[in-house]
């Protein structure tokens, strides 16, 4: 290495010192020698070898270059974390079709959870999310992991043909993570505030509400004002007239039926008095709020959810991530 490539700090070193330092650096980094072997071969102490290797980095004799593999987007993830003050971000190239996005996000979320869930976690899961169903389908059992409780974040009772999906989502997730499943035995959306108040006093519901105060992880989908096919079939979807009213109030998306505007601010409407699910305060008090969502139809909702702090970890597709960083506006309704 010529002298111009070495930082000015090397000016105080003699040629013999630089030669030794460079020789040790090549033996360690290029030839794969371990420090004890280098010390023995050169008849110097191992502590000196360690010191000289550090010095080689300090003065630029050794430079570390990270080569990011194809299909890995850590640079974009870091920008998302900085821009939206996220705890973590995962970005995957999901292809173009909705089915591709769903399958790829499910696999990415399964891998992320496998790496980050901890013993004794108290986990809440959205009841009606096709993306989270894809996640549990991609998960594998972890013999060394035993979470505490896994519970629903909104009522999981719906049309019998579809309720099986909400039940399977919670039951399989609990089985795979060793947690105790705790169901919310109500619909997610009821007809009136009176019905809601009566159900909130049910002992089984009170038990779930108490667990919401202890959550360490919330795993949620991010929805739009237009219900997803799964939610529409469940019998828990908002009616067309209510969709229209929420749209007039500026709603662009929801997390667990809590609808928000483009700035992520909660929409205050009578609709909130019909929801049987975690409150905004309980959700935002949860330390890790993991949102799994992607695709062009979800862009406005995802952007708003990030602005409002509804999630602080995002697992999404590459196209959505790039749009978020470019600050693209969502579609105008």
Image (spheres, rainbow, N blue to C red):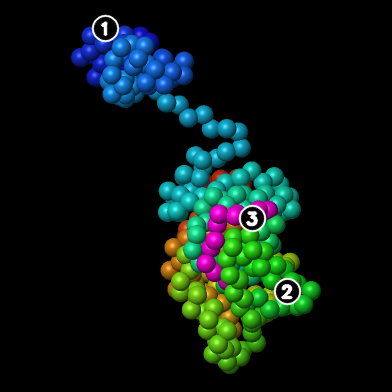
| Separation of residues labelled 3 and 2 (CA atoms) | 24 Å
| Separation of residues labelled 1 and 3 (CA atoms) | 58 Å
SS label for mark 1: helix
Residue numbers of the magenta segment = 138-151
145 is higher (above) or lower (below) than 75: below
SS label for mark 2: helix
Q: Which residue is tagged 1? A: 16
Q: Is residue 65 visible?
A: yes
Give the foreground label among 2 and 1. Answer: 1
Q: Which residue is tagged 3? A: 141
**CA neighbours of label 2 inside 10 A, class few (<14), some (14 to 19), many (20+):** many
**CA neighbours of label 3 inside 10 A, class few (<14), some (14 to 19), many (20+):** some
Q: Nearer the viewer, residue 299 or 35?
A: 35
Q: Which residue is tagged 2? A: 163
Q: Is residue 148 magenta?
A: yes
Q: Left of 199 or right of it: where is 41?
A: left
Answer with the quarter of the image where residue 1 lies.
top left
SS label for mark 3: loop
Please state the horizontal and vertical placement of residue 176, each as a whole percent of the image: 63, 60
Question: Which of pointers 1 and 3 lies earlier in the amino acid sequence?
Answer: 1
Answer with the quarter of the image where residue 167 lies.
bottom right
């Amino acid at each position: 290495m010529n002298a111009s490539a070495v930082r000015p700090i090397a000016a105080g070193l003699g040629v013999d010192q630089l030669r030794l330092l460079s020789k040790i650096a090549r033996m360690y980094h290029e030839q794969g020698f371990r420090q004890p072997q280098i010390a023995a071969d050169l008849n110097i102490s191992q502590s000196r070898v360690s010191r000289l290797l550090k010095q080689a980095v300090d003065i630029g004799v050794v430079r570390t270059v990270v080569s990011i593999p194809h299909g890995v987007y850590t640079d974009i993830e870091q920008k998302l974390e900085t821009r939206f003050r996220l705890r973590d971000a995962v970005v995957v190239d999901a292809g173009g079709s909705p089915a591709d996005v769903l399958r790829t996000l499910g696999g990415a979320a399964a891998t992320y959870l496998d790496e980050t869930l901890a013993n004794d976690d108290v986990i809440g899961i959205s009841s009606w999310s096709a993306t989270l169903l894809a996640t549990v389908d991609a998960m594998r059992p972890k013999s060394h992991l035993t979470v505490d409780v896994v519970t629903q974040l909104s009522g999981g009772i719906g049309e019998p043909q579809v309720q099986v999906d909400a039940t399977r989502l919670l039951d399989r997730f609990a089985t795979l993570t060793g947690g105790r499943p705790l169901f919310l035995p109500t619909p997610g959306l009821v007809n009136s505030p009176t019905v809601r108040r009566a159900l909130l006093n049910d002992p089984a519901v009170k038990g779930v509400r108490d667990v919401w105060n202890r959550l360490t992880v919330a795993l949620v989908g991010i929805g739009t004002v237009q219900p997803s096919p799964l939610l529409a079939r469940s019998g828990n979807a908002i009616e067309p007239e209510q969709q229209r009213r929420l749209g007039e109030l500026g709603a662009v998306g929801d997390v667990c039926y809590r609808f928000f505007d483009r700035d992520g601010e909660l929409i205050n409407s009578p609709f909130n008095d019909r929801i049987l699910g975690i409150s905004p305060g309980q959700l935002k008090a949860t330390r890790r709020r993991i949102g799994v969502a992607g695709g062009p139809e979800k862009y406005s909702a995802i952007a708003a959810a990030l602005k409002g702090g509804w999630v602080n970890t995002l697992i999404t597709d590459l196209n959505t991530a790039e749009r978020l960083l470019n600050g693209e506006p969502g579609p105008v309704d």
